[in-house]
Amino acid sequence: MTDQPNEQRTFGFETRAVHAGAAPDPATGARATPIYQTTSYVFDDVEDAAALFNLQKMGFIYSRLTNPTVSVLEERIASLEGGRGATATSSGHAAQMLTFFALMSPGEEFLSSRKLYGGSLNQFANSFPRAFGWKAIFVDGEDADSYRRALTPKTKAIFIESLANPGGVVSDIAAIAEVAREANIPLIVDNTMATPYLCRPIEHGATLVVHSTTKFLSGHGNSVGGVVVDSGKFDWTAAGKYPALSDPEPGYHGLRFHETFGDLAFTIHAHAIGLRDLGPNQQPMNAFLTITGIETLALRMERHCANALKVAEFLQGHPAVAWVNYAGLPDSPYNALSRKYMPKGAGSVFTFGLKGGFDAGVAMVEGVELFSHLANIGDTRSLIIHPASTTHRQLSEEGLKASGATPDVIRLSIGIESAEDIIADLDQALKKAVR
Amino acid sequence: MQHDTYGDSYLSDILASVKTIAMVGASTNWNRPSYFVMKYLQSKGFRVIPVNPGVAGEQLLGETVYARLEDIPDPVDMVDVFRNAEAAGPVTDSAIAINARIVWMQIGVRNDEAAARAEAAGLKVVMNRCPKIEYMRLHGEIGWNGINSNVITNRKRPVKAVKKLM
Ligand SMILES: Cc1ncc(COP(=O)(O)O)c(C=O)c1O
């Protein structure tokens, strides 16, 4: 689309959200991406099969590794994040497992923010060390120096959330990326709550970006899924401590992924080894729903953010509300970081505190009539949960306090309904909950 | 011409105009990147002539290996350089000497002085890219493994008639 031989026209975010990765079906011309509901793909002949199995050509063998519907989703998210490639998985948690699987060996460590989705805290603190011997070192403090001080020779990565669930907290991505760069380790950013529409961590120095596509990307509360995006910018060979990517791979006759595939290495490894051997591939039906959801991501995120800001402002002025933790509010301690990293809006998931304890929280979630009381975020519908009585029930009193899920806390995920209806529902429920 | 980025049409015109590629630094070890690339390009209908003094005279994927570009008896359209940046200099001079039209240096290989000499002699130059990856990218194959092609299209992607692998 240009006469300059050495320049390439780049397309805008909204255009890529609709088109990237997809093309009319080569066999039928079908314009929407078909759901390739198949396990396997016929080889041309034995030579063709051998070339595919040896990774000498790309193509489809078996849907645990690659599937044409899923690959459209992968390329689309890679494009929106500004990455080199992406690997879709069965869930956000599977994306995290696949990511660390490529980087870590038993006995090694990674640094993790404490301000994470509770499920990720469980995965890192309990299951990773028990099953794989990967140790998460949780960093106290959110500034870059806290991360720098926690580094050891065994540290293989740093993991943060751009906008942390349950909301209100924004990480200083560029400063933490600089710590990772100095230590020659990758920074992994969970960008689920912000989405690439609001924040693109690779532009701020992240090496890898993970998502629970379950949330805003699919966006309609109908498909669990995940993805890991690689920037293609990390030199796995020069770093000398990522043997899965730099050393001969016995599962492929001694092939070295980074030497052979260059900046495609992480993504090809995640399919050819990660998905092949661990098995958490995304299903084509879920990929189809998520591709369709992403087409309207920009429109939805605009409305999510606009509604969330109105709701946060309403709550801030409400007599039954003790505090509101939304980074989009000017008096939030995270407002400056939010304006730096997500200038188009601070997302739509946040917490507020009721004047009243555990019982008020229970009455609140039982009193709403439009909000859905459930354990998800990033739906077109507005969602509500009282962490202390649900998601964080397993935690001790101390753990509740550390994770910010004290008995008065309510988490909201503001949907794209009419703002006045969302506000009216909260207003009537607050009246019932706090008397 | 600057060589930090290349337009899609620049690369696709080159790949569409080429029939015979001399691959300098071709390996006879089936697990080396050059072998992957040679085999792939053959499968897409290109003739690839391997150049490697260490194994000159041997057969590789159905072709005779030559010691130097100057030893190849047939006309060569493009020279694919699987050598380091320093070695790419004299290889480029040989490419000019044998009247190749294109010098293509692999990922990680960039030699701006050599590129300037080639361009002054009327050759087209690509550096720090892989012809296999670019071919896959421009033909919609690369997305099959989740790679970002940066291509937006409203056309059916051709299911290319693939030459039988040798
Ligand atoms: C920020 C964040 N990361 C990861 C996950 C895990 O994703 P999934 O539920 O798709 O496994 C979630 C889910 O709530 C999340 O909110």
Image (spheres, grey):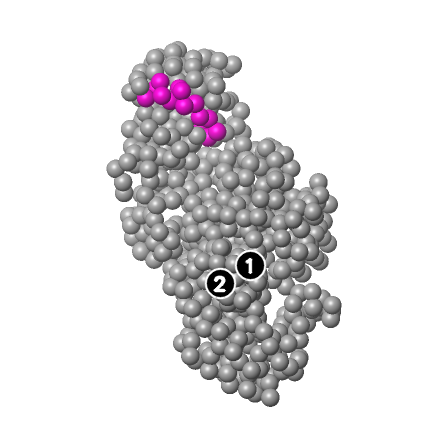
Secondary structure state at the residue bearing disc 2: loop
Magenta residues (range): B106-119
Would residue A132 be seen by someone viewing this image from the given angle? Answer: no
Residue A310 appears in the rendering: yes
In this rendering, would A302 be left or right of A320? Answer: left
Identity, as a three-letter code, of the amino acid under mark 2: Ala
Residue at the outermost front position: A331
Please name the residue shown 51% across and 70% down the image: A413
The location of residue B29, given as percent across then percent down, is 53, 24
Give the amino acid type for the residue marked by disc 1 in the picture. Val
Label 2 in the same subunit as label 1: yes
- Residue A170's tag is 1
Q: Which chain letter matches label 2?
A: A
Q: Residue furthest top?
A: B71
- Answer with mark 2 or mark 1, whichever residue precedes in sequence: 1
Of residues B83 and A175, the one nearer the viewer is A175
Q: Position of residue B50 (x, y in %)?
A: 43, 20
What separation in Å lies between label 2 and label 1 (alpha carbons)? 9 Å
Neighbour class for label 1 at 10 Å: few (<14), some, many (≥20)? many
- Circle 2 sits on which residue? A346
Q: Is mark 2 in CB contact (under 8 Å) with mark 1? A: yes
Quadrant placement of the C terminus of chain A: bottom right
Instruction: Work out whether residue A80 or residue A249 is closer to the camera in this orientation and state it.
Output: A80
> Where is residue B23 shown, x and y percent of the image?
42, 22
Residue occupying image coordinates x 50% and y 72%? A312
Numbered disc 1: secondary structure: strand
Q: Residue furthest left?
A: A3
Number of other residues with Cα within 10 Å of mark 2, as a class: few under 14, some 14 to 19, many 20 or more: many
Residue at left offset 50%, top offset 66%: A330
Image mark for residue A306: none
